Image: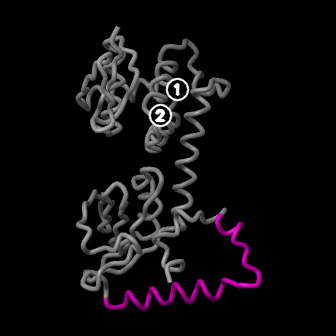
Amino acid sequence: MFEIRLQYDGTFDGFLSLVFYAFENKTEPKEIAKPANVSQDLFSEVIEVETHTAKAERVWKGLVNKSSLKNARLISVAFMSELPGIEVLLWRYLKKVFTFPQKDFYQNMLDEDVYQVVQTARKVKKEVHRFHGFVRFQQTADNIWFAPIEPDHDIIPLLVPHFKNRYSGQPWVIYDTRRKYGIYYDTESVSEVFIEYPALDLNTGRLSEKAKGSHEDDYLHLWQQYYNSINIQLRENKKQMTRLMPRRYWKYLPERNR
């Protein structure tokens, strides 16, 4: 008997379309992944599921009705974790939510899948909270504030509300160098952007001489002076520092790249 492996375009709408397909065709997928990551062998069948906005919307509305809007948003946050096997975990979870008679099943923390989904969403939210303080903007030559980041999870969309509110009168870009896309805010609307790397040093996150604003070196110097002024070497606690600011986030922090 062939095992079914489903592939989708990697978007949340694509995943919800896949959930619709699996229910409609009574399919129990062995694996769910993006095309480049789907494994194939002689005893499996790979099915590519197209994204249909209407079908995705039906699944979303059904999830809200069967649980709550807050819970549906929790699922989308967990999806952004991009952790290995997250799609299969969410599929098992959604199948239970839709098929169990109890409407409050999604609150059953004794169920392993419910617990894992909630914990995964918490990990993503924790990283979002951290990046509220870890984003460092640089002024570009055309007066746009630019910040490269390299988060563990695909959190850029979740950062928008905070920075849109905090810097409402200033155009800015937050760019994920791992996933190669960013969010541009022009003081009125938000859009996705894709940037060529020659303007950015991926090792330090610093803009090229041509791309950076005339006062950017001064701002960098101020960041480093600020760090030196609050960092009392005799009382330095590196263990506590790395707990609050893990080393994997130091790459694009100017105060740590001196």
Numbered badge on residue 67: 1
Left or right: where 16 falls relative to 53: right
Q: Position of residue 109 (x, y in %)?
A: 66, 28
Disc 2 is placed on an element classified as helix
Disc 1 is placed on an element classified as loop
Left or right: where 248 falls relative to 15: right
Q: Position of residue 15 (x, y in %)?
A: 35, 32
Which color scheme did the rendering employ for the protein?
one colour
- Residue drawn at 71 percent across, 85 percent down: 232
- Residue drawn at 29 percent across, 25 percent down: 55
- Residue drawn at 41 percent across, 23 percent down: 62
Which span of residues is magenta-colored? 214-242
Tell me the amino acid under the disc marked 2: Ala
Q: What residue did someone put label 2 on?
A: 72
Q: Nearer the viewer, residue 172 or 111?
A: 111
Verify whether residue 188 appears in magenta: no
Q: Nearer the viewer, residue 95 or 105?
A: 95
Which quadrant would the N terminus be assigned to in this image?
top left
Q: Nearer the viewer, residue 152 or 203?
A: 203
Q: How far apart are the alpha carbons under marks 2 and 1?
A: 7 Å
Up the image or down, 250 lies above or below 44; here it is below
First in sequence: mark 2 vs mark 1: 1
Tell me the amino acid under the disc marked 1: Ser
- Residues at circles 2 and 1 in contact by the CB criterion of under 8 Å: yes
